[in-house]
Image (cartoon, helix red, strand yellow):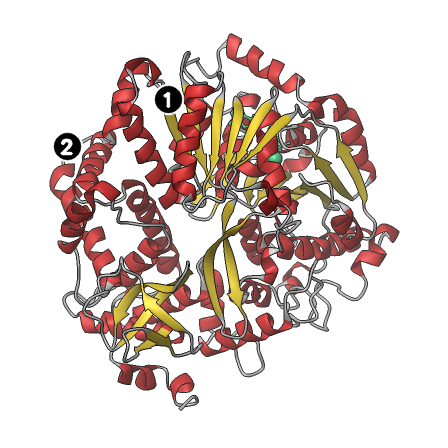
Amino acid sequence: FRNSTDNLKRKVNFSNHSPRKPHSFARRQEIAQQRKSLPISAVEKRLIEEVRNNNILIIVGETGSGKTTQLPQFLFNAGFCRDGKVIGITQPRRVAAITVAKRVAEECGVELGQKVGYSIRFEDETSSSTRIKYMTDGLLLREALLDPYLSRYSVIIVDEAHERTVHTDVLLALLKKVQYERSKSVSGHVHDDNKKVGSGMTLGNESGGLGSSIIKQCQGRKYPPLKLIVMSASLDACVFSEYFGSAKALHIQGRQFPVDILYTLQAESDYIDAALITIFQIHLEEGPGDVLVFLTGQEEIESVERLVQERVQQLPEGSRKLLTVPIFSSLPSEQQMRVFSPTPAGFRKVILATNIAETSVTIPGIKYVVDPGFVKARSYDPLKGMESLIIVPTSKAQALQRSGRAGREGPGKCFRLYPESEFAKLEDSTKPEIKRCNLSNVILQLKALGIDDIIGFDFLEKPLRAAIVKSLEQLFLLGALTDECKLSDPVGHQMARLPLDPIYSKSLILASQFNCLEEMLITVSMLSVESIFYAPREKLEEARIAMKCFASSDGDHLTLINVYRASEEFLETRKLGLSKDKAEKIMGKWCKENFINYRSLRHARGIYSQIRGHAEQMGLRLSSCGEDKLQFRRCLASSFFLNAALKQPEGTYRALASGQVVQIHPSSVLFQPKPECIIFNELVQTNNKYIRNITKIDYLWLTELAPHYYIMQN
Ligand code: ADP
Ligand code: MG
């Protein structure tokens, strides 16, 4: 639905998929050839042998060597799926799980969702015949709630472990226990290998190990041993090896061509602008080859995409053969595969990616990398209990990974958009996420697995004690924990069942009591995606006027509901007799006219139907407050009371729980005039501390609806 791409599409017929028939003989041969040439293919036999001989294996290999796509197939062919068992591969990122599963399904010549499938939050493409299952690390953690022994799996591969997401870290600890317990269930005694690993943290023992409550159901049953493989792109395998009692580590030799690293002469004040100039510099001055640009998120990617497309039009006719392809995690899955389509002859492809393209997905054809040197990361202040997203410089390890992407198929170039002297100042590696995030979600899940001693839990790297205490306190205040720090009944258990942040889960549970679950489901879905509105620089005023049509004077949450409902209504009136494709198209047009981000809205609609299903299953009462917006706002106050803020005389706000001084983000409908008391959804830090997604409340509601907090605090 963007003009300029539409033009390009018409000219070159740049389709979403490879134009060759997927299962044609030629295509199969091509794939077989590609597979054979991957570095990992040379060591297939050896790998299988090592997996047979070791219950835990660490595999380190250069990005692109074939670990993620090939190893599961090797294991399948070697018989690891006998008796209907499944090989599970976890990824920190949804995009990787989806694109890799699609690729492997194609390599196997099967339909996605049959032998090969994927499962991520809000999307499941698996069936009872799935044997190779890609999923996010978070999803496997959730599965453990229902199947504590992960009994369907014969092998679990924790991929991209170097990313050290909080879910990967917790998953490793959990798998260590599951493995120990499964080996015990077979032999009745602990295998020597595992003794060291398992000591002092048995699963299902009476002293409150993993699943002391849930596991009881499973006792007495026998489970075949679980093979565990930890894969990582970084050379530092020691931390994993040590954690698993000196587990064996294997290195797969990759191929890497030299990459020229270029730095800017001076610091660049606007890295977006610098990236744009660099893209065109490469396009006009360098030889053939695709460009990979690392940006920090969807908003940035979409704005660069528009700017590139505009500037392309200003180039002389002969130089316009430049295509942009975005890739970020919430991109609709059918659009994600576009990065893998071959570049049409004579064209240059510019891939605009988040750090997904660092190691998780390997895109063929890249010769140039543009690295502004930034990444969006979570950050947590355990004293204030506030988590925020901030844009920070990458680590040296990340910068190296990024530049490496240019040298996979031949010599390449990497343009770092900062001076060389800055490189030396970067941190060596990124701090594990568990040390810089709110732990409420993870603690809730561990509690649901029966693990009550969080501070004593065998983490790969311990989170800050203060962060654990703060998160426990938050869960307690949300009513998820009892005075004894156990999961409360029913609220805590219900919250653990919902695949959402604890505050969102609580808001749904409360909404069923406040008679506004319909509204809250929409709100949570809309808040789960990035940027519903978009305002291109050159059309700011038009975008502002368009947004006014949806604006609610009560705040952003109701504004988001208005957008959602308006889109539903619009579709209702046109849907009759329209094919799905047509309906999508007119929806896209409607979004464009209203300056709504179509991709985000579509994603939100998908999330809505998923969480609505969860809410129904849990027996929550689905009702709407209709015109009674007061009910909805009171419900928000009662769930988000930890994020309440009061206006200060000078127009800033003081967040009541943390005491921080914050400002309303200019994109909020409540930016002007400013209400006295508000609740907010998130804190974003740039030069200022901005709060986003805000609703006006009455401060008296706080003591009325959250007396356990606001009276206590006076
Ligand atoms: P690793 O996990 O070691 O980084 P992968 O198994 O992800 O490596 O990738 C192996 C090869 O498969 C790479 O050359 C990559 O370009 C290719 N590949 C992966 N996914 C796709 C896809 N969806 N389409 C085309 N090629 C792909
Ligand atoms: Mg991989």
Q: Nearer the viewer, residue 377 or 460?
A: 377
**In the figure, is residue 402 to the left or right of 390?**
right
Q: Amino acid at mark 1?
A: Leu
Q: Position of residue 362 (x, y in %)?
A: 56, 30
- Separation of disc 2 and disc 1 at Cα? 38 Å
Q: Nearer the viewer, residue 157 or 595?
A: 595
Give the secondary structure at mark 1: strand
Q: Residue at x 40, y 45 (%)?
A: 270
> Left or right: 299 with respect to 223?
left
Q: What x and y, as percent, mark residue 448?
A: 56, 66
Tell me, yes or no, if residue 249 can be seen here.
yes
First in sequence: mark 2 vs mark 1: 1
Q: Amino acid at mark 2?
A: Gly
Determine if residue 338 is in view.
no
Residue shown at the point (35%, 19%) measured from the top left: 14
Residue 333: image quadrant is top left
Ligand 1 neighbours mark 2 (CB distance < 8 Å): no
Residue farthest right in this picture: 192
Q: Determine the residue positioned at 26% across, 61% down.
A: 668
Quadrant including the N terminus: top left
Between residues 136 and 643, which one lies in front from this camera angle?
643
Q: Nearer the viewer, mark 2 or mark 1?
A: 1
Which residue is under mark 2?
577
Q: Quadrant of residue 629?
A: bottom left
Mark 2 surroundings: few (<14), some (14-19) or many (≥20) residues within 10 A:
few
Question: Residue visible at 23% across and 45% down?
Answer: 596
Label 1 belongs to which residue?
322
- 527 or 430: nearer the eye? 430
- Residue 705 in the image: x percent, y percent? 33, 82
Give the quarter of the figure containing the C terminus.
bottom left
